[in-house]
Image (cartoon, rainbow, N blue to C red):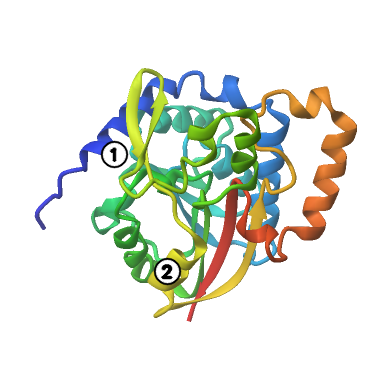
């Protein structure tokens, strides 16, 4: 099989997150809203995943989710294009003696046909918009079915084209940020640790369209629809009562229209027919 060249944008993203890998946990591990988001995603998955399932994680980062699921008794193959992130994950796995639960492989999600460990798996999982770093998401989605067992699941956490919180920045005069998702056909530039790469935004209809032949939707939730996005630094600490109120209301409304469509992210799970 001829090895495909990794697209330039992915190479740039790989460099950016490798640069950030050594400080990633220090920057984000203690953040209240990021931990809220992780808890929401994990609770969503555990609602459907059977005990002892095998998980393929895409853009696994430093391994925070992989370690959580390993501690719950699942087996995880954690993949990431970033060598630095993979090295951080390997260190954590060794320190926690989780080699029997977690394996890893440096691999782009656009090259899953070259994955050495092809499973099959019971869940393909991608957290926190890693899949927004490609304009070839349709090709990524097309590779899922053959990697899953019958009845297997896909759970993706994606940035949509509309976010209520960002749009409200219009009232602060931040016009470029307020509308950056609307006008993103050619991608929007992100800047991480001295590297510039592009991100694209995808509505749930895109996911459903490209997976409808082999998958049915199980559930979809908005994430950070009422709870502020994590880039509003210190909100939970500065306004603990308001933060608690927002968490309670988001729990009530997360799966309802229009709230499931207007968050900073959405969580969507589908099951293979």
Q: Are marks 2 and 1 in contact (CB under 8 Å)?
A: no
Q: Residue furthest right?
A: 241
Q: Taking 150 as reference, is 236 left or right?
A: right
Q: Position of residue 22 (x, y in %)?
A: 46, 19
Q: Position of residue 79 (x, y in %)?
A: 39, 45
Q: Position of residue 262 (x, y in %)?
A: 62, 54
Q: Which residue is mark 1?
A: 10
Query: Can residue 62 be seen here?
Result: no
What element does badge 1 sit on?
helix
In 3D space, how far apart are the residues under numbered discs 2 and 1 (Cα atoms)?
25 Å
Q: Which residue is mark 2?
A: 148
Q: Is residue 223 above or below residue 154?
A: above
Nearest to N terminus: mark 2 or mark 1: 1
Residue occupying the point 55% across, 27% down: 95
Mark 1 neighbour class, 10 Å CA radius: few under 14, some 14 to 19, many 20 or more: some
Q: Is residue 104 above or below residue 208?
A: above
């Amino acid at each position: 099989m001829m090895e495909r060249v990794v697209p330039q944008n992915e190479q740039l993203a790989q460099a950016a997150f490798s640069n950030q890998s050594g400080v990633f946990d220090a920057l984000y591990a203690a953040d209240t809203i990021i931990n809220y988001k992780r808890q929401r995603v994990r609770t969503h998955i555990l609602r459907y995943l059977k005990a002892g399932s095998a998980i393929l994680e895409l853009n696994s980062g430093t391994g925070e989710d992989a370690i959580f699921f390993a501690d719950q008794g699942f087996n995880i193959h954690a993949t990431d294009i970033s060598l630095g992130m993979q090295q951080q994950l390997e260190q954590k796995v060794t320190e926690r003696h989780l080699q029997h639960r977690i394996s890893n492989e440096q691999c782009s999600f656009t090259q899953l046909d070259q994955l050495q460990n092809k499973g099959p798996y019971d869940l393909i999982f991608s957290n926190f918009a890693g899949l927004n770093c490609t304009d070839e998401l349709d090709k990524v989605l097309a590779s899922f079915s053959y990697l899953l067992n019958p009845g297997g699941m896909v759970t993706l956490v994606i940035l949509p084209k509309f976010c209520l919180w960002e749009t409200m920045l219009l009232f602060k005069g931040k016009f470029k940020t307020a509308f950056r998702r609307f006008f993103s056909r050619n991608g929007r530039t992100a800047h991480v640790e001295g590297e510039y790469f592009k991100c694209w935004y995808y509505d749930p209809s895109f996911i459903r369209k490209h997976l409808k032949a082999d998958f049915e939707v199980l559930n979809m939730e908005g994430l950070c629809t009422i709870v502020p996005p994590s880039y509003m630094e210190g909100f939970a600490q500065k306004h603990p009562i308001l933060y608690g109120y927002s968490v309670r209301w988001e729990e009530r409304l997360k799966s309802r229209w229009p709230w499931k469509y207007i968050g900073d992210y959405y969580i969507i799970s589908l099951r293979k027919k």
